[in-house]
Image (cartoon, grey):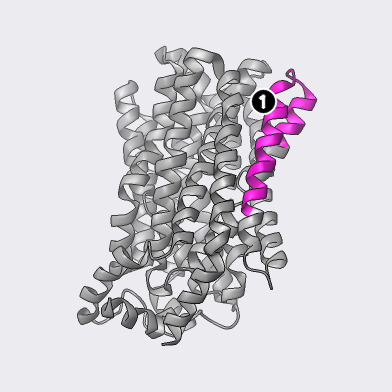
């Protein structure tokens, strides 16, 4: 315990720079761009579901596994890979990850059967395993504390914009040139950004902005101490535990909807692959906009009342559940799309408040691992089982029946967030007291 207290009181627990500089926004832009590439590599598959189903005679369960296996690998590997990134250097780690998932996407482009495609998707998941957690840790390290909820939401929204571009670009290319060309184009685009990334973003300049020694340049003698810190500090409070769980449950819906909406539009609205992709892209854009705007609202409304972040997270979950329930009771048409758009706007609104809560309740020195733990919960409880279980249920009840069950998960997440409200202020005070000692 003495080791933990000493680490918390160290300069690494400082709140970061007092203001954002121009290079801070360059870091954000490049990290955001790679995150878009990350999710484009995921979403290209979902946009081509109808073509793969027809060519290889696949079930919805098999299609769901191809989508969910990426999140499953992220869940299994995000914590160890994030710990390694904190030690080896975040910039080098992010570059290697991006190169790997881009090459894996190219492997998918030449897959000759289901097994080879599944292997390629596994490799995509390995490459993407720690990008979200390490990327957000890199971003918030070069911005002031007061911007955390907004930045967390804005950065995570990059995943939704990746969905937008992925499904739109993949749908257009697949409709005119086949699904292999779609994987090829997105893999090559990600590889180009990955190669450029370390030439623009460097550990030295980031360390200068933060005002303390970077993780990659830390003395060798400090490594053993940091190795002990995450296992005890990541779960030090009841509130952060509930934040992990609530976020993971809500991401079940946030993972299932983007994976299956293109197919839903193809089956129930009878849209061709390219048109379904275009409309899906608009819905994903609503989701990304909602994530950012809900994060901004959380920062403003909780400026003097930090516990409001949790109540807002709970409200976003309830709102998405109501909108999705109404949408699934409507017949295919404009009204159904309208309520589906509202559900998508709110379904990931809790991302910003939760990101700020995790950042505020864990030491700056282990933010990479803290966000890896959040990523673990998001993927293990949400992004991995969401598409897979939805596909399995769809095989029995139809995709419409599977979608009608999703609001129950959102309501459970809302209850978890509401329960976390009781101890949030107390846990914040404990962290502040330890940091001041």
Q: Residue at x 51, y 26 (%)?
A: 48
Give the farthest residue toward the bottom. Answer: 437
Give the farthest residue toward the right. Answer: 335
Q: Main secondary structure of the magenta part?
A: helix
Question: For mark 1, what is the residue?
Answer: 275
Q: Quadrant of residue 302?
A: bottom right
Task: Locate residue 306, reporting x and y percent.
Answer: 63, 68
What is the span of residues highlighted in magenta in the rendered image? 313-341
Q: Nearer the viewer, residue 3 or 203?
A: 3
Task: Locate residue 371, reporting x and y percent.
Answer: 43, 59
Question: In the rendered structure, does residue 319 fall within the stretch colored magenta?
Answer: yes
- Is residue 273 positioned above or below 37 on the image? above
> Does 303 sit left or right of 218 as displayed?
right
Q: Residue at x 37, y 54 (%)?
A: 130
- Is residue 38 positioned above or below 430 on the image? above
Q: Split into 4 quadrants, where in the image is the N terminus?
A: bottom left
């Amino acid at each position: 315990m003495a080791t933990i207290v000493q680490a918390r009181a160290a300069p690494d627990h400082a709140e970061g720079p007092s203001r954002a500089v121009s290079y801070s926004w360059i870091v954000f832009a490049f990290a955001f761009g790679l995150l878009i590439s990350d999710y484009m590599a995921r979403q290209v598959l979902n946009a081509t579901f109808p073509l793969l189903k027809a060519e290889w005679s696949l079930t919805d369960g098999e299609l769901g596994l191809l989508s969910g296996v990426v999140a499953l690998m992220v869940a299994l590997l995000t914590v160890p890979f994030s710990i390694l990134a904190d030690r080896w250097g975040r910039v080098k780690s992010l570059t290697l990850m991006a190169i790997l998932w881009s090459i894996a996407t190219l492997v998918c482009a030449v897959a000759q059967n289901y097994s080879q495609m599944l292997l390629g998707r596994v490799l995509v998941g390995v490459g993407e395993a720690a990008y979200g957690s390490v990327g957000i840790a890199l971003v918030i390290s070069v911005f002031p504390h007061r911007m955390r909820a907004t930045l967390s939401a804005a950065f995570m929204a990059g995943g939704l914009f990746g969905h937008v571009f992925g499904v739109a670009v993949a749908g257009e290319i697949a409709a005119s040139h086949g699904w292999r060309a779609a994987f090829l184009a997105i893999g090559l685009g990600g590889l180009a950004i990955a190669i450029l990334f370390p030439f623009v973003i460097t550990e030295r300049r980031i360390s200068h902005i933060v005002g303390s020694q970077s993780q990659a340049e830390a003395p060798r003698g400090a490594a053993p101490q940091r190795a002990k810190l995450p296992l005890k500090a990541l779960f030090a409070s009841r509130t952060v535990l509930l934040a992990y769980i609530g976020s993971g449950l809500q991401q079940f819906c946030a993972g299932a909807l983007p994976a299956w909406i293109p197919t839903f539009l193809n089956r129930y609205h009878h849209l061709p692959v390219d048109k379904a992709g275009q409309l899906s892209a608009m819905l994903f854009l609503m989701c990304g906009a909602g994530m950012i705007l809900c994060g901004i609202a959380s920062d403003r409304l909780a400026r003097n009342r930090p516990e409001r972040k949790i109540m807002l997270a709970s409200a976003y979950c309830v709102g998405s559940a109501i909108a999705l329930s109404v949408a699934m009771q409507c017949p295919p048409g404009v009204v159904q799309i309208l309520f589906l758009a509202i559900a998508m706007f709110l379904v990931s609104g809790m991302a910003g408040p939760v990101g700020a809560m995790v950042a505020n309740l864990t030491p700056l020195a282990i933010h990479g691992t803290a966000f890896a733990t959040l990523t673990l919960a998001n993927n293990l409880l949400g992004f991995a089982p969401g598409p897979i279980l939805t596909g399995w249920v769809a095989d029995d009840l139809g995709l419409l029946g599977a979608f009608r069950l999703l609001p129950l998960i959102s309501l459970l997440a809302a209850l978890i967030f509401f329960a976390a409200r009781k101890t949030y202020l107390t846990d914040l005070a404990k962290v502040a007291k330890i940091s001041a000692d």
